[in-house]
Amino acid sequence: MIEFIDVKKIYKNDKIALSNINLKIDKGEFVFLIGSSGAGKSTFMKLLLKEEEVTSGKLIIDGVDITKLPRRKVPKLRRSMGIVFQDFRLLQNKNVYDNVAFAMEITGHSQKEIRRKVPSVLSLVGLSDKAKSYPSELSGGEQQRVSIARAIVNNPSLLIADEPTGNLDPQTAWEIMELLKDINKRGTTVIMATHAKDVVDKLKKRVIALEKGVIVRDEERGTYDE
Ligand code: ADP
Ligand code: ADP
């Protein structure tokens, strides 16, 4: 579903953030993206979301080269992706239900669809009893569950997670990983940038390692270190 062909990204200050990126990610894969700070992980994810433009090469998603995608089609591309951040990024003045419902409202779903879908997604992430709580009343793990619910409520084919366990204690991190694995098992492709060595080593998923903007390792059932 995703193919990078000779992708290069040079920022305006002439910084080469990614070069010679060639890879395919099949529908339903779970991929860890690893590498030290500055290796190019965020850039990789921003290119997929078309938050940054590829400098040269092709980036094909479901048969379409998104480097040539007209601007008017970008919102539809983004709707096919869910994104989860390290710092949750919830709306503090909305409760759990409304944080998730809002993601459906801005994508034009009817109130009827929202009333049907939000409770089922909250149930999936184990937060049915917290629907009326506000983010400030939740633990870090619960806030991350809300952000995952928001990311998947529109049934994206791809979930991009940027250090989703970075702010969580080890036990809570494992619970979030179980949830991401469940979502992946239901067919959603997951690309997760992480520094969590124990998580990567335990899950034995595909590992793509970046170093100074190039892929230095790409292994099925990989580990954090070589
Ligand atoms: P990572 O997410 O692995 O920390 P990034 O993709 O953020 O790496 O950064 C890759 C390289 O590109 C780094 O050298 C970084 O300083 C540079 N970079 C990132 N964003 C920008 C930008 N907007 N303008 C210029 N350089 C950038
Ligand atoms: P700590 O003792 O560092 O607080 P935990 O007790 O949560 O951390 O976990 C210790 C180790 O046990 C983890 O590093 C991990 O390898 C493994 N582990 C814990 N929970 C799980 C889980 N749900 N699934 C897989 N491995 C787990």
Image (cartoon, rainbow, N blue to C red):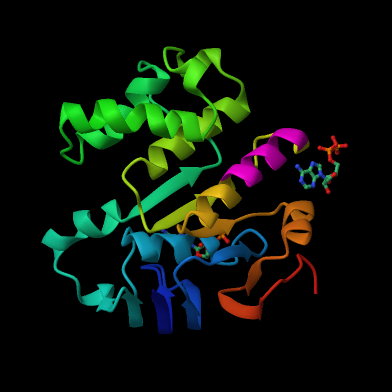
Query: In the image, what residue occupies the spot 56% across and 18% down?
Result: 138
User: Quarter holding the C terminus?
Assistant: bottom right
Q: Position of residue 95 (x, y in %)?
A: 39, 16
Segment tinted magenta in the rendering: 171-179
In this orientation, does residue 169 appear?
no
Q: Position of residue 207 (x, y in %)?
A: 65, 69
- For the image shown, how many numbered marks are present on the structure? 0
The stretch drawn in magenta includes residue 138: no
The stretch drawn in magenta includes residue 178: yes
Ligand 2, by image quadrant, is top right
Q: Position of residue 209 (x, y in %)?
A: 65, 71
In this picture, residue 145 sits left or right of residue 4 = right
User: Quarter holding the N terminus?
Assistant: bottom left
Q: Is residue 4 above or below residue 107?
A: below
Magenta part mainly helix, strand or loop?
Answer: helix
Q: Is residue 25 above or below residue 136?
A: below
